[in-house]
Structure formats: structure tokens, C-alpha cells
Amino acid sequence: MSENSANLEATGKPTPAAGCTIFLVILGMVAFLAIFATYQYKQYKAEIINISQKTQKEIQVSPTDKPQEIDALVKKMDTFAAAVKDDKKAEVSFSVDEINLAIAHYPKLENFRKELHIKEITSEAIVADISFPVRAGFDGIRYLNGTMKMDPVIAQGSIFPIVTEVKPDTGNPVPPKFTKEFPTFLFTEYRNDEKLADVFHKLSKVELQPGKMVIISDPDIKQPDALPEDVTYETNRAFWVFGLLVFMFVTTVAFLLWVKRRKQNASE
């Protein structure tokens, strides 16, 4: 190393080697994230195409032309809701037909019309016909047609349906990660609806019996304060990607500060 180089380093001014190192680190991170994102996109797209179809299958929607049935359902709902709001122990049961009628009648359940229809309730699961729109990357909307089994549980004081099985009409298996994620994007809206909170967040227990679902609200029952572990996959992946982006941001800021300092030293 020459005397001039030694003197330059002795002054504490940044050297080209340090800048090149930072730049290469940033370039490496950008390349890694680009490759990772491309791989994830192609994998996700292929998996969606594998289990979905181009057209939506017809899903039965219960008729709403019988006012006496709707009145009976609304009265049952209102009676249960009033007891829950008053912090009284209350219990209500819904048959398959009543759940389907609720989907057809209540505006807040409109998103499920033509997408979900309850076929059966057993002591282990709620079985439904489904035709959910899914997006295969940038290629537009496709439809996940098939059947789905749900096991409703109480989490954070409200009903949270764990999806235990999805059988697409394509006959191809659904990746486990998709099965775990279904409840989050299907039902989160209702968990966060403030207008429903005074009832929806005071539920204590849900039971399945042949042909009906029973919901219990009991102020003496301690409510679970955490979501089931089955639905944490998406959250964990989001934190991991967030960590990568934070690292990339920090290295970029470091590089820009180095460039700024180099220019200041050069002008002195």
C-alpha cells in the first residue's frame, strides 16, 4: 500500500472498498428478494391453478319468500343477542336450513351467497358446498369449487371456524397452508366488526350436534384469549418477510449515508 493511501485511511475518510462492500450487500439482498418473490409467485400460482377452475359452479341459495320463516329466525337471533348484551347466560341452536336462510337474508352475510351453502352438520364438522373466487397471480379470477369441512371453536370470545378439510372438484389435494389460511380471509371481517362486538365477542362455547349448531354465552366461562395455532402460518411468514425488508432498508440507509459523507469529505 502506498504512502498516500495510508495517509488517506489515517484521516478517517471512507475508502472505495467500504462503499463497494455495502453496495454489494444491498445488491445481493435485492437479488435474493427478487428471486424469492418470483419463486413464491410461481409456486402460489401453480398451486391455485391446480385446485381451481375457470368457471364458478352454481351454489344453492335458500329462498327468502316465506316471511314466517324469516320472522322466526330474526326473533331467535334478537332474543339471544339481547340476553348476551345483558350479560345473561344464553343458548341458541341453528339448524342447517336456518344457517342457510341467515346467509340468504342478512346483508352482513351477503358475501357468502352463491359461494357457500351448508349441506350437513354432524357431531364433528359442518360440511358445505363452496365456490370461492381465488386469484392465480395476475391471470385473473378462478374458482375453488368443491366441499369444505369446518370445526367451529371459540377464540377471543367469538366463533372462529377451523377448516379441517377442503376437497376441490378438480380432485387435486389442497396444500395444508391454504387450508390453514382459509378462516383468516373468510371470517376476519366479522371478528373485527365493531357493530357485532357486543354480542359476537361474548360467546363462550359452540357445540355441534347431528343437524344443528349450538352456541352458548355464559359470563362465568373464561373466554380463550388466543387464536388457534392452526391459523398462525400466514402471520409467521409475514414477520419473516418483514424482517428481510427491514434489513434491506437498513443497509440502503447505511449506503446513502456513506455516499453523503464521502461527498462531504471530497469537498473539504
Image (cartoon, grey):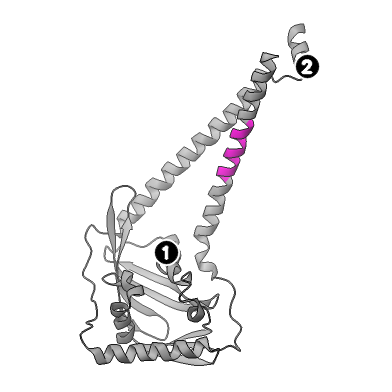
Q: Is residue 251 magenta?
A: yes
Q: Is residue 246 magenta?
A: yes
Q: Is residue 95 left or right of residue 218?
A: left
Residue at point 36%, 91% (across, down): 75
Q: Which mark is residue 185?
A: 1
Q: Which mark is residue 133?
A: none
Tell me the quarter of the image containing the C terminus.
Answer: top right
Give the spatial CA distance, label 1 vs label 2: 58 Å
The local secondary structure at tag 2 comes to loop
Residue at point 41%, 65% (across, down): 182
From this view, report whether residue 36 is shown above or below residue 166: above
Which is the main secondary structure of the residues drawn in magenta? helix
Range covered by the magenta-colored residues: 244-254
Q: Is residue 81 left or right of residue 143?
A: right
Q: Is residue 267 left or right of residue 180?
A: right
Q: Looking at the image, do the residues carrying marks 1 and 2 touch, with CB atoms under 8 Å apart?
A: no
Q: Position of residue 133 (x, y in %)?
A: 30, 61
Between discs 1 and 2, the one toward the N terminus? 2
Q: Position of residue 47 (x, y in %)?
A: 36, 54
Tell me the quarter of the image containing the N terminus.
Answer: top right
Q: Residues within 10 Å of mark 2 (few under 14, many from 20)?
A: few
Query: What type is the residue that disc 2 sits on?
Result: Thr
Q: Nearer the viewer, residue 82 or 91?
A: 82
Q: Which residue is mark 2?
A: 11
